[in-house]
Structures are given as structure tokens and as C-alpha cells.
Amino acid sequence: MKSDIDTLMTARGLDALIVAGGEGYDDVLDYLVNGAHITGGTIVKKRGGDFLLIVSGMEIEEARHSGLKVMTYGELGYMQAVTQITDPLLREVKKLELALQEAGVEGGRIGWYGRNTVNETIAVFQALQQELPHYEFVGEASPSLFEEVMLTKDTDEIERLSDIGARTVEVLEATWDFIASHQANGDDVVVDDAGNPLTIGDVKTFVRRALLDRGLEDTDMIFAQGRDAGYPHSRGQSNMPLKLGQSIVFDLFPRELGGGYHHDVTRTWCIGYAPETVQKTYDEVMQALDISVETFGVGKPTHTMQEAVLDFFEGNGHQTQRSHPGGLKGYVHSLGHGLGLKVHERPSISHTRREDVFAVGNCVTIEPGLYYPEDGYGVRVEDTFIVTENGELVSITPFKKDLVLPLKEA
Amino acid sequence: MKSDIDTLMTARGLDALIVAGGEGYDDVLDYLVNGAHITGGTIVKKRGGDFLLIVSGMEIEEARHSGLKVMTYGELGYMQAVTQITDPLLREVKKLELALQEAGVEGGRIGWYGRNTVNETIAVFQALQQELPHYEFVGEASPSLFEEVMLTKDTDEIERLSDIGARTVEVLEATWDFIASHQANGDDVVVDDAGNPLTIGDVKTFVRRALLDRGLEDTDMIFAQGRDAGYPHSRGQSNMPLKLGQSIVFDLFPRELGGGYHHDVTRTWCIGYAPETVQKTYDEVMQALDISVETFGVGKPTHTMQEAVLDFFEGNGHQTQRSHPGGLKGYVHSLGHGLGLKVHERPSISHTRREDVFAVGNCVTIEPGLYYPEDGYGVRVEDTFIVTENGELVSITPFKKDLVLPLKEA
């Protein structure tokens, strides 16, 4: 939570932090500016001090919505300084130097956050080492300070995440009903008497509109059928007609319009009927989901949950990433991940990332799956969960987990 | 263009390049994978050699859509290697080392691209320096190699950009008609006989749907009225009712669904009537647009176009960022920017970035504006232009530039 920032700065020996990246969505910036829509901007904070947000004059009115102390690059003196500097790297150095000075940071260890191109980060970093040797700019592998801060959500965030979950469930319901309202012609799902097929593209268009109507936006959903469903991240082919009796992996991970918090849910559907193999695999995946939830406990390492599922799947004869690293069939991914302003946050629920521990305030996905692309199917089921103040793991995806989606008029 | 990559590698003394960032949209990755929808992935290329795309097994099916040579991290040997490595930094180092070796790169200068968090980039960079001293990973300030590559668009890209422009114009037309279909009640624009106001939020919802219907998505449009219009990047307040006689700055910069090429257009509208001051300012901005186009020439430095506009505005008594760096009124931004997979690319049309030159294949915005927030208004007009093979500057935003938007029934 945000209230942990000073404590985590102390633990890392940071005298100050600065958030200064390039263009494009930056979850750390968004996290700190409380929903203000800012292009660019620099945030600086001395340990124990307040946040200072510096933006271009064009952004100042939006920046005031952040509730932070704000100033423009003009007020900082940067716009005047830059008229004397032609080297783009030295301009960046001057910007960071002025920002740190404005926050009263005259030296020491500086945690540097934000998102930028790798090439520019390296170039600026080397220029900073050269030009400002009284500061030490500190890199961090994952989990970074802000990843640790975001590990636990506060009451407002949990409420917001739950609300996004409720809206996403409405979209799932609407999508189920939309597909169900069509007719079958043999093994095709058709839209009219002429036998024109309902395609994956049609469904995705429906889903995007349904999200928009609820203030959400798609971030590249998966709606993959048959063999494609056997590759966990295949998006699905737009022009492919929906077929009866095929496994369809529908993974929806929308976010608030314009950038914000996410939800993440997967259902596997078979339209009309489920082949025996798919049904059997589905039942195993559902059992793995139950095992996951039973294994949960606040304070437990997250890898123990993944290991319980690995034990179960391997016991049933499936290959996994533990038994066959790099394999393409069986259980080929980790069990889940934290969720918030990014769709993948810490904690990881993985056997290879072993340092995370379940805690009150976590928001995580749990998403076991089994994949057999050469046999033409895949199955995944996923809910988003929060860990309540009572230490309970509660799904915020209250949508049915039926495999078979019957057409109303078959 | 893509065909320039080897030449630019030679010019920079690069023996190889690697694209390896974190999660989230990465324009360089998207540019190279030809529309495949991949989460993560590493691309490596020896100078003179082909591109090699390495992805997780989950992504392999999507990755094949790229047309590049593809392999999984399992096939690379990374998934096996990682079982022996617990340090996340050393895992990253191993990944890049294996990728470079697979491409036959045993040493030398490596251009490193992609997008990632600043903190992780620095941490990995320092680990690479320590662990793989036979490689020199090279940072680059803007313009990076890929920014230079993307400076000019090939025929397919120009066609795609023009098509997005045409669809965006349809949305502008539909939005104009949508607003015009409402009635006035005094200075309010109202939606029904009860006098309920049409709000900025209503208009934005309409625009988002109209974009979606055309395969485009909003990336945080500006629809700012009155005083808000006086701050170039104020997004507009959703609950604010539309008023007659206020300047409205409508800046729309959508992209293809799920990430892709952009369009960028701004119109300033006054509903019903325009106050004399706004009309006069609008006429000046339109004149600045004409001056910009007249100043254009292939081979000319882009800053000369900005300087022509600065001369004109300053001659008319307006403050600018040249006369008053950091000022908040008058002409407070640069004249334009390149456009493609990012909404802001090179070339810059600015008096402070002086190294860019107009070239065949450029896709650029031209967007003069004047801002007087304390007087409650702002004006900006913007089209997206391409530079044709004949060296002509041609707008791909064929939408009328009327200031006054009359209601059909006032």
C-alpha cells in the first residue's frame, strides 16, 4: 500500500526516489497521481517528504487533479536552462538534477522508476553517472519498491477492483447470452437462415462494445477455439466460424477506460456439447482450482500453491513445466499472478519464483489449465481473488463455470 | 523504413541488435513482428543476418504469424538453464546470452532496444556489464536506430495510415452530426425537453463507440471546453455540460484496435456561435497552418517550419515558447511530430530539436494553437500529413475546418 513507501525506502537505503520515464502508460506514475491524466511528468520524493509532481505547462491543469504538490518545468527553471543545452542527454540530466534539488535532495542513493525505452534509459543512466556523481542512481530487479508497494491493495483499491469484477461478469453474461441466442446448422453456429457463420471476430466485437458500455476497455482478449485453444496465448482467428463441440478458451482481462485497474477471468466453453476428452480435462482443471483454493493461507509461500497443482497434474500423468521445462503440452504455465494497474503484478504463483508470500490485501488470479494443441484442444479456468482482512481468499469473479454453452434453439 | 536497418547498424558500429524489454506495448517489437500479438518475446539480429524471434511456448502459435524465424525459450535452452539459476538478474543475463549465441553473435557492440521499467533496465544493464564483458551493450538517446528507421514509412504503412485517417474522419463527421442533432436551451446544449444537458462525457462515449465500430480505439482523447481548452492537454471534464459560444478543443488520436498505427487530428469548435475574440484567434491559427504548409520542403530542417510560425505569432503580439520559455499563454508547444506506431515519433517540428529534416515517407502532424486560459479559451487545429514520393505534403485528414458548429434546431 502507498503508506508503506517510506518504510520500503528505508529498507532499501534510498534517500529519495524519482519517477521519470518516457511516453506511454506508466503504472507507477498512474498509481501516484490519483487518476489525473498526464502525458509525461516527473515525480520526486525525499524519504519522509511529500511527493512533488512536475509537468509541462500544457499538463498543469490535469496535474492539479492529482492532489499532489505540482509545478511546471517552467517554474522549475528547466525550460530556461534547456535553451542553453543542445545535447538531449544533458537536458535529461539537467531535468533530473533540478527536480532533485527542488525536493531538497543534494546527494545520496536515488531509486529511479518509470518506464522508458531500454536504449534511452541506458544512455541517460551513463550520462547521470558522469555528470552527477554525488547521486547514486539505483536499479532494482523485480520485485521493485513499487511492486512491493502494490503487492497489497488498500480498501479503496479493493472496492474499485471488485466493481470492475462485477462489470466484467456482466460482460461474460451478455456474451454467453449473445452466443446462446444463435442457431446451429450441423456443427456450425450460424447467424441467419442463409447459414452465415458467427465468427470469433463477431464475438470479439460484441465483447468490446459490452465492455465500453460499462466503462471498460479490452486489452487484447483471447477467444481461441480448438487447436488454437491448445496454445495458452493464441488470440484466436477473427474469421474463424464458431463450431459446436470445440473447446473455446475465453480469457478477458479488461481495464478501466484510458488506463487503470484490471480484471482477469478465463472460461472454457464448448458450444452445444463437450467431447468426452475435453469434459474429462475440464473436470481435472476444476479440481486443480479447488486444490489451489484449499492450499491457500495468509503467510504461506505462493509457490506451495503451484506445487500442489503440479503434484496433482503430474500424478494424473500430465507433463508440467516442472517435469518438462519448455514443454508445449500439459500444464505449461504458472498458476497465477497479482493484478492491479498492470495485468501481471507480484505476487507470482510459480514454482520458479519462490520468494512471494500470500498477504492480506493481495489481488491475485488463479488459473490452472491443460493444453493439448496436437489433439485440438485446451482448457483454462480463472477467477480473480482478493485476500480479505480476515485472511480469506474470495473470488471477485462471480460467474458460473459451466463448460457447455447450449444454444437456445439447436 | 525497415530496409534501412542494416545501413543504420553499420553507421552506429553495431554488430548486432537485440529487442528485449518488459511487459506492455512495445512499438519496436510490434514493428518487427508484422502484427502478431505477442506478450513479451526477444528479437535478435546480427548485422546482415535475419531476425530471430524467441517467445515462450504459450506464444509460439501467435509468433508464427510474424513471418520471422521463431523458436521457444525451451528450444533455446533457457527454460532448462533457468532451473539452475535463482537470481532474477542472472536469469535475464542468461536469456540475452543464449539469444545472442543462437544468432551467432559471440561479442561486439550490441544495440539494446525495447521498453521496460527504468529500475529493471539499470539493474540488468549493470549485471550484463559484470557477467558478459565480451559484449558492449550500447544505449542511445533519441533518435534511436528504430526512431530513425521509423522516420520514413513504406508504401504499405502509408496506405494503412491513410486508411486510419479516413476512418477517423468518419468519426469526426459522425460526432459533428451527433452534437448538431441536439437543441439549445439558452446557452446550454440539451438532450431532451426536460432540459437535461449534453455533457462532455456523453460526447466521449459517442466517439469511443464510433471508433470501435471502425476498428479503432481511443487513447485518451481531449475534448476540453472554455478555460480547460486554454490548457493544451486538459482532457475535459466528463460531467461538464456543453455550452454555446465556448471554444472546444477536440483532439483525437486513436489507434488500431489492440495496438498499432495512429491518426492525430484536432478541431476547435464553437457550438452555435463564436465570440469575436475566439474567431479572431481561430483565423490566426488557420493562417499559421497555411504558413506551415507553405514553408514545407523536402530536405528542409523541420525547425524552420516552427520558426516561421513563431515569427508570425510573435509578430502578432503573442507570447511563444521562444520569447517566453515555460510561459502558459500564447503559443506554448511545438508545431508537430512524427506519427506511426507511437503517437509521438520523430521528426519533431520544434525550435529546440534542430536536427530533423523533412523527407519522403514522413508522416507528421502540423498543429498550431493559441491558448488564453485566463480569458477562458484556447484554439488548436491539426491535420496529419504524409510526404509523398513526389515530395508533396498531403493531408490525410480530409475533414472540414469550420469553427462554428450550428445546432440543427437552435
Image: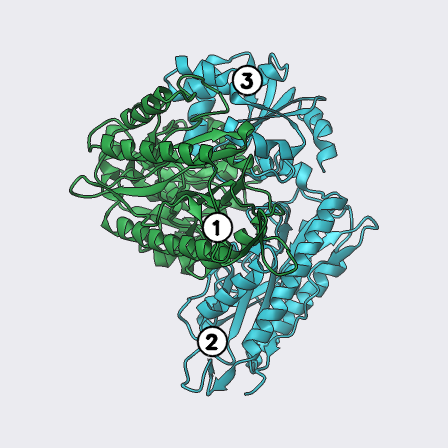
Chain colours: A green, B cyan
| Disc 2, SS | loop
- Mark number displayed over residue A218: 1
Toward the left, the furthest residue is A390
**Pointer 1: residues within 10 angstroms few (<14), some, or many (20+)?**
many
Quadrant housing the N terminus of chain A: top left
Mark 3 lies on residue: B76
| Disc 1, SS | loop
Q: Assess whether mark 3 and mark 1 are in contact (beta carbons under 8 angstroms).
A: no
Residue B198 placed where, x, y %? 46, 76
Rendered view: A176 above or below A300: below
The chain carrying label 3 is B
User: Which picture quadrant has residue A177?
Assistant: bottom left
- Mark number displayed over residue B242: 2
Rendered view: A138 above or below B331: above
Identify residue type, mark 3: Leu
| Disc 3, SS | helix
Residue B288 placed where, x, y %? 67, 65
Identify residue type, mark 1: Asp
Q: CA distance from mark 2 to mark 1?
A: 29 Å
Residue A13 falls left or right of residue B29: left
Residue B362 placed where, x, y %? 71, 47
Q: Residue at x 27, y 24 (%)?
A: A304
Identify residue type, mark 2: Leu
**Pointer 2: residues within 10 angstroms few (<14), some, or many (20+)?**
many
Viewer-nearest of labels 2 and 1? 1
Q: CA distance from mark 3 to mark 2?
A: 58 Å
